[in-house]
Image (cartoon, rainbow, N blue to C red):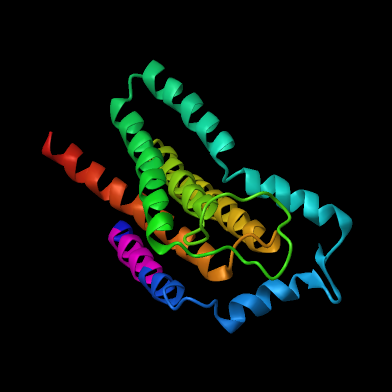
Amino acid sequence: MLLLSAAAGGAALFALMAALALRGDPLAFDKEILSSLRRAGDPATPIGPCWLLGAARAATELGGTPVLTLMVIVLSGYFVLKREGASLAILLVAALGQSMVVNSLKAAFGRARPDFLPHLVETTSASFPSGHSASAAAIFLTLAALVARETKDRAVRNYVFFVAVALALMVGASRVYLGVHYPTDVVGGLSFGAAWAAIILIAARRFESRD
């Protein structure tokens, strides 16, 4: 029931963000939030203490392709050695599938990145949905579910999901702080990633129940 709610809620929220992205021009609050994160009169300088920029750049790497690819490779080896074929398949479908779908969505929407303030990290692809946010949500939540399957301790299960959600939100927030995504891009990416993870886990449960 929880997975169905996550899938439906994530899909609905993504659809709403997609409808807003299709409007063309960014919404006023999208621009206002981005502008509020830069110092008045100096759009190249983010607000906050000097260490915050470095922390945001480090956080955003958690949702980047190099870090997540390494994580998936390492965990794939772990599942192979433990002969957990189901967990390996779930992880690979969640990781590779969301990447292909998100790249297709970016091409379909073709939304331009924010161009009214300097980007604080390099970007190459379209803006909607946020790939970092989608990848972080999909992979971290999938991993949390795989870990939760190994224990019946509710406190442990709650903890791993809390960490997964916190990491995904941190990645998403960093993308806005660094000026490379509108908030609607990030919400769209997070909601897509959550829905994708839930759908993969639902499908895995139904497949396993038939064996």
Q: Which residues are magenta?
A: 4-14
189 or 88: which is nearer to us?
189
Rendered residue at 57%/49% (across/down): 124
Which residue ends up furthest to the top in the rendered image?
81
Q: Quadrant of the C terminus?
A: top left
Could you tell me residue 151's position as x and y percent?
41, 38
**Above or below, comparing residue 143 to residue 184 in the picture:** above
Rendered residue at 66%/57% (across/down): 174
Could you tell me residue 12's position as x and y percent?
34, 70
Could you tell me residue 11's position as x and y percent?
34, 65
Report the number of numbered marks. 0
**Above or below, comparing residue 113 to residue 80 in the picture:** below
Q: Is residue 189 left or right of residue 206?
A: right
82 or 42: which is nearer to us?
42
Q: Is residue 194 visible?
A: no
38 or 24: which is nearer to us?
24
Q: Is residue 70 visible?
A: yes
Which residue ends up furthest to the bottom in the rendered image?
28
